């Protein structure tokens, strides 16, 4: 059991990294990775919402939608739950945890339409994970997101001093750099499976 | 006379999405599916058509309801409308093209949070009448489909040596299989975007390709966070 959980956690960070391997959450990856502190703030908020959203949507799907044969409503229900949850988190944080709100609050409205959140909740159901596995998967996905954001903000700082050919300036060269970072992650292929013998 | 100008105006709305405001290469919206599913021409076409259907439907519905929806709850309301159309598309694709349903996987439901559908609802459909909104959805959808297909064509041809599953490159040439893997997606997209910018720069236009501007200004949420997403 513990081995399975650890396997899910580490494979979500390295071999199935949401940003660099599965292409989820590219918009914040390109948009908010310029500065290290905003990269950390954004990914902390994403990780937090991922775990909370999974904690809420998994029971709804397994106990409510599936027994009633309403599985096809998954997309609508999940996105609504996520939208409400983000709004609720914002209100609760503002009222009871002002320091946390000051650190993460500005990123929260951006998160509703972040595909990593909806992606992780749907993939957990698709993969047939149980409740504990789903939560660990969400946590791993968040940590993987943070790893990619933090690494890439370092690359971006170097990139600003580089002088690429004129048409490549700005976004194109950033994408080529992302390609190289992503290339380094393909090196982890099969590593986690070997370690945990799965 | 007036009728004619209205007509040409509608044509401009339609062609806007094809080149000038191409959703993927210009507005940099919907990057996730652009990178993820363009490993083959078949997937690209399927994804593009599914997104086009959603765009036309959601744009029309949003535009028809634009006076009924209170400003404060408009983003959740738009998302719900879009999610409804996405569910319809999912059921249709699952019933008629099960191969495509398996190939697109999680990216099909993710059209809901695709910045293109929400972005157009927010930027265009919530301010314009129904017919113009439908045309905008069609134009954006075709622009998106074209970009996806070009990406899919390049990646499938060079990465696997095939087009739509048919062997095109002689089998003796070893395909660059890296191009159909994730790093290749980033690379081809970056090069394609540079080509689009180069074409515009040759015409003497200045092009702003600052990722911070693209990532935030094009995002439907920028009205919520006043474009200050990452700038603390």
Image: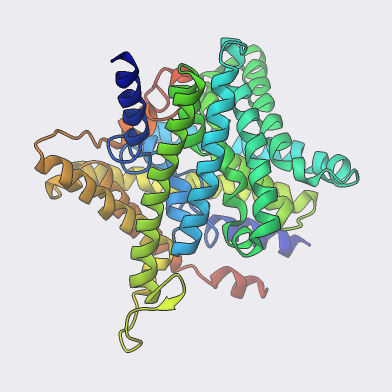
Looking at the image, residue A191 lies above or below residue B86: below
Q: How is the image coloured?
A: rainbow
User: In this image, A198 relative to B117: left or right?
Assistant: right
- Front residue of A117 and B56: B56
Name the residue rendered at 14%, 33% in the picture: B206
Quadrant where the N terminus of chain A sits is bottom right
Quadrant where the C terminus of chain A sits is bottom right
Identity of the residue furthest to the bottom in this view: B172
Residue B91 placement (x, y as % from top left): 70, 49
Quadrant of residue A44 within the rendered picture: top right
Residue B26 placement (x, y as % from top left): 30, 38
- Front residue of A119 and B12: B12
Q: Is residue B221 visible?
A: no
Quadrant of residue B231 within the rendered picture: top left
Q: Is residue A192 visible?
A: yes
Residue B87 placement (x, y as % from top left): 68, 42
User: In this image, B70 relative to B155: left or right?
Assistant: right
- Front residue of B203 and B223: B203
């Amino acid at each position: 059991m513990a081995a399975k959980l650890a396997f899910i956690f580490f494979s979500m960070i390295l071999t199935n990294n949401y940003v660099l391997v599965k292409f989820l959450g590219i918009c914040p990856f390109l948009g908010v990775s310029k500065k290290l502190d905003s990269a950390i703030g954004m990914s902390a908020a994403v990780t937090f919402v991922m775990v909370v959203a999974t904690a809420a949507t998994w029971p709804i799907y397994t106990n409510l939608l599936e027994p009633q044969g309403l599985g096809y409503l998954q997309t609508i229900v999940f996105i609504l739950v996520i939208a409400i949850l983000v709004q609720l988190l914002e209100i609760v944080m503002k009222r009871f945890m002002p320091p946390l709100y000051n650190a993460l609050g500005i990123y929260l409205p951006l998160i509703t339409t972040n595909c990593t959140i909806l992606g992780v909740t749907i993939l957990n159901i698709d993969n047939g994970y149980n409740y504990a596995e789903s939560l660990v998967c969400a946590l791993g996905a968040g940590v993987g997101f943070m790893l990619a954001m933090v690494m890439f903000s370092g690359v971006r700082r170097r990139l600003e001093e580089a002088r690429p050919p004129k048409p490549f300036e700005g976004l194109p060269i950033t994408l080529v750099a992302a390609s190289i970072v992503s290339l380094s992650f393909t090196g982890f292929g099969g590593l986690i499976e070997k370690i945990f013998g799965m | 006379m007036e009728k004619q100008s209205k007509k040409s105006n509608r044509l401009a709305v339609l062609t806007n999405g094809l080149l000038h405001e191409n959703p993927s290469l210009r507005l940099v919206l919907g990057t996730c599916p652009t990178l993820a599913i363009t490993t083959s021409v078949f997937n690209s076409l399927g994804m593009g058509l599914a997104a086009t259907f959603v765009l036309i439907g959601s744009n029309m519905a949003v535009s028809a309801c634009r006076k009924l929806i209170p400003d404060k709850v408009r983003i959740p309301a738009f998302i719900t409308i879009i999610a409804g159309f996405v569910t319809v598309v999912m059921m249709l694709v699952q019933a008629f093209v099960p191969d495509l349903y398996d190939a697109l996987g999680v990216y099909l439901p993710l059209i809901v949070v695709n910045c293109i559908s929400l972005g157009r609802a927010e930027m265009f459909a919530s301010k314009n009448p129904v017919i113009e909104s439908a045309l905008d959805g069609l134009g954006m959808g075709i622009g998106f489909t074209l970009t996806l297909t070009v990406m899919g064509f390049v990646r499938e041809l060079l990465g696997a040596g095939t087009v739509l599953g048919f062997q095109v490159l002689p089998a003796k040439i070893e395909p660059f299989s890296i191009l159909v893997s994730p790093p290749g997606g980033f690379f081809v997209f970056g090069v394609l975007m540079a080509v689009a910018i180069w074409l515009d720069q040759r015409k003497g236009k200045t092009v702003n390709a600052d990722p911070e501007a693209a990532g935030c200004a094009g995002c439907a949420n920028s009205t919520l966070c006043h474009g200050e997403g990452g700038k603390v």
